[in-house]
């Protein structure tokens, strides 16, 4: 659960009355991911009214007409604020999990049915068997061709996948099991860190994705978050070892690390990211309760959830 007072502060900074979570660090846009995070936090704080507003706005504005998945971005002030219909798998996972949690907490059959429809769409449209592995496509379009599949480990929302596997082991169990294999395969360079984006080629051949910076950073910080939320701290032992080595040498934890060259960002992890690192390392690292950056504040709030 989440302290209602902390949630109230978060809500005041990022939630509009109509139910839209605003990404303050990205020109005020909204994402399916942000809606999912907001719904999870509202449910954890017991704020049914805020949850209902977010669920309604998300369904009315982002839910596609052709499949029960959500367009990934809303840009206010545009003639067509949802110009890109492509989805983001992590946003859909978060929304489906939030609806499942809320449906159970408040006895709402409609939320449970919505969650089931989204889960079914993810299972049929985004979970694929390729290159010797069951994989999660990051979106409907643009991540798979004949010789490779592009994946992002931070899209594997482990507590959601675990919850869905309890309901449908045949559909979600293989994704969970092979996702854990990916966490072991995706360790690059002397730091043994995963790159945010990966190419899966051949038979379980995993490489940093071509055409993208080979960094563990802005997105990858969610890998240890979801591992800890699902009781899988050991799956992030390489990340913990890397961060521990930096601390022992008197260095701050960088916002990103190039997994090939070892180059690090000239600035440190955000407040929310630092709190996640602290939790992984067994240290209490408080985050800024008045953080005005949506992503950092959201990481910090999600890090407080104990399942």
Image (cartoon, rainbow, N blue to C red):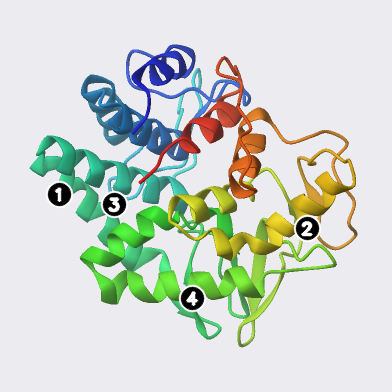
Instruction: Indicate the quadrant where residue 49 lies.
Output: top left
User: Nearest the camera: 25 or 187?
Assistant: 187
Q: Residue at x 52, y 86 (%)?
A: 132
Q: Residue at x 45, y 59 (%)?
A: 140
Percent of width and height locating residue 45: 31, 27
* Mark 4–mark 2 CB contact (< 8 Å): no
Confirm whether residue 125 shows in the render: yes
Residue tagged 3: 66
Residue tagged 2: 214
Q: Which residue is drawn at 85% across and 67% down?
A: 190
Residue tagged 1: 113
Instruction: Indicate the quadrant where residue 147 lies.
Output: bottom right
- Sequence-wise, the earlier of marks 1 and 4 is 1
- C-alpha gap between disc 4 and disc 2: 22 Å
- C-alpha gap between disc 1 and disc 2: 39 Å
Quadrant position of the N terminus in the picture = top left
Bin the neighbour count of mark 1 within 10 Å (Cα to Cα): few under 14, some 14-19, many 20 and up. Answer: some
Bin the neighbour count of mark 3 within 10 Å (Cα to Cα): few under 14, some 14-19, many 20 and up. Answer: few
User: Nearest the camera: 162 or 307?
Assistant: 307
- C-alpha gap between disc 3 and disc 2: 34 Å
Residue tagged 4: 178
- The correct choice, above or below, for 274 with respect to 157 in the image is above
> Closer to us: mark 3 or mark 1?
1
Percent of width and height locating residue 202: 64, 86
Percent of width and height locating residue 27: 61, 21
């Amino acid at each position: 659960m989440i302290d209602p007072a902390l949630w109230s502060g978060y809500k005041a900074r990022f939630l509009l009355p109509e139910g839209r979570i605003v990404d303050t660090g990205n020109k005020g846009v909204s994402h399916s991911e942000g809606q999912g995070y907001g719904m999870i936090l509202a449910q954890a704080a017991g704020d049914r009214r805020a949850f209902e507003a977010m669920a309604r706005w998300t369904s009315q504005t982002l839910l596609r007409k052709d499949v029960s998945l959500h367009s990934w971005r809303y840009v206010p002030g545009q003639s067509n604020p949802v110009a890109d219909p492509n989805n983001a798998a992590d946003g859909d996972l978060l929304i489906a999990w939030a609806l499942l949690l809320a449906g159970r907490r408040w006895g709402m059959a409609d939320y449970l049915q919505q969650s089931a429809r989204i889960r079914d769409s993810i299972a049929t449209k985004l979970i694929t068997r390729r290159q010797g592995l069951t994989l999660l496509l990051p979106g409907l379009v643009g991540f798979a061709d004949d010789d490779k599949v592009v994946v992002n480990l931070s899209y594997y929302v482990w507590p959601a996948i675990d919850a869905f596997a309890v309901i449908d082991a045949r559909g979600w169990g293989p994704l969970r099991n092979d996702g854990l294999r990916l966490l072991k395969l995706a360790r690059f360079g002397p730091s043994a860190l995963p790159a945010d984006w990966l190419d899966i080629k051949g038979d379980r051949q995993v490489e940093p994705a071509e055409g993208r910076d080979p960094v563990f950073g802005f997105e990858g910080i969610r890998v240890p978050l979801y591992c800890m939320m699902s009781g899988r701290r050991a799956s992030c032992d390489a990340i913990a070892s890397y961060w521990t080595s930096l601390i022992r040498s008197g260095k701050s934890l960088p916002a990103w690390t190039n997994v090939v060259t070892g180059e690090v960002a000239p600035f440190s992890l955000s407040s929310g990211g630092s709190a996640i690192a602290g939790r992984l390392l067994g240290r209490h690292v408080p985050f800024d309760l008045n953080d005005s950056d949506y992503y950092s504040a959201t990481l910090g709030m999600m890090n407080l959830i104990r399942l």
